[in-house]
Amino acid sequence: MSSQLRYDGVAIALHWLTALFIVGLLAVGLIMTDLPKGSALQFSFFQLHKSMGITVLGLTILRLAWRLAHRPPDLPETMTSWEKTAAHAGHLGLYALLFGLPLSGWALVSASPRNIPTMLYGVVPWPHLPILSTLTDKKPVAEAIEDLHSAAAWILMALLVVHVGAALWHHFARKDDVLRRMLPRFSSDFRSTAR
């Protein structure tokens, strides 16, 4: 059993930075689809959305690499086996979507008949995926990827609600340390990382 009570500082920072970008991505994604089509504002929002998506992909790669090299704290012994299984499945689902959504977004941009270049944060040019960008009939492929991307975004929102709800339930109903071990140390009331 791990002697660690909390996630380490790097894992905590990557978690909250990813969370911040995900909330921003979802907000920008919802707003940009309601803006006038082809407007300069919509174009700016699309570019920001693409930039944030690639950033999430990079953060997720870092998070997974860090997690594979640093064992996370064990789940509380008070959790039943089905709760632990659900927690692990939820985390796997979140990781799958944190990879899948940016990759499907990148694929969508690459397959788009409009062939609009991506400039990350208006500075760094980002290439299209080679196979998708050279298709002769892009429209049906782009439409299929767009449907997949949109459905995955709604699934991510649902999983996030469950994830946050579970963390709050652990904190307020169970009164265990599941939420606190992922919070930054803003005060001295946190226990040592060693038992």
Image: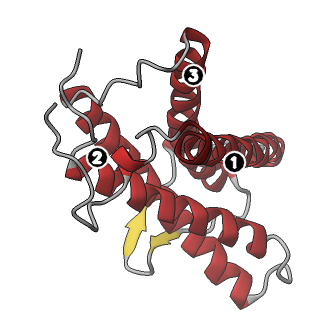
Q: Earlier in the sequence, mark 2 or mark 1?
A: 2
Q: Do the CB atoms of the residues marked 3 and 1 lie less than 8 Å apart?
A: no
Give, as a three-letter code, the residue at label 2. Answer: Ala
Residue 12 in percent (x, y) is at: 31, 51
- Which residue is identified by label 1? 161
- Which residue is identified by label 3? 89
Query: In terms of secondary structure, where does tag 2 sit?
Result: helix
Q: For mark 1, does the 10 Å Cα neighbourhood hold few (<14), some (14 to 19), or many (20 or more) residues?
A: few
Q: Earlier in the sequence, mark 3 or mark 1?
A: 3
Residue 123 in percent (x, y) is at: 37, 79
Q: Earlier in the sequence, mark 3 or mark 2?
A: 2
Question: Left of 79 or right of it: where is 76?
Answer: left
Q: CA distance from mark 3 to mark 1?
A: 15 Å
Question: Left of 77 or right of it: where is 68?
Answer: left
Query: In terms of secondary structure, where does tag 1 sit?
Result: helix
Residue at x 31%, y 60% (from the top left corner):
184
Give, as a three-letter code, the residue at label 3. Answer: Ala
Q: Quadrant of the C terminus?
A: top left
* Numbered tag placed on residue 11 in the rendering: 2
Give, as a three-letter code, the residue at label 1. Answer: Val
Residue at x 40%, y 69% (from the top left corner):
125
Residue 46 in percent (x, y) is at: 65, 72
Which residue is nearer to you in this view: 67 or 175? Answer: 175
Residue at x 51%, y 20% (from the top left corner):
79
Residue at x 67%, y 72% (from the top left corner):
28
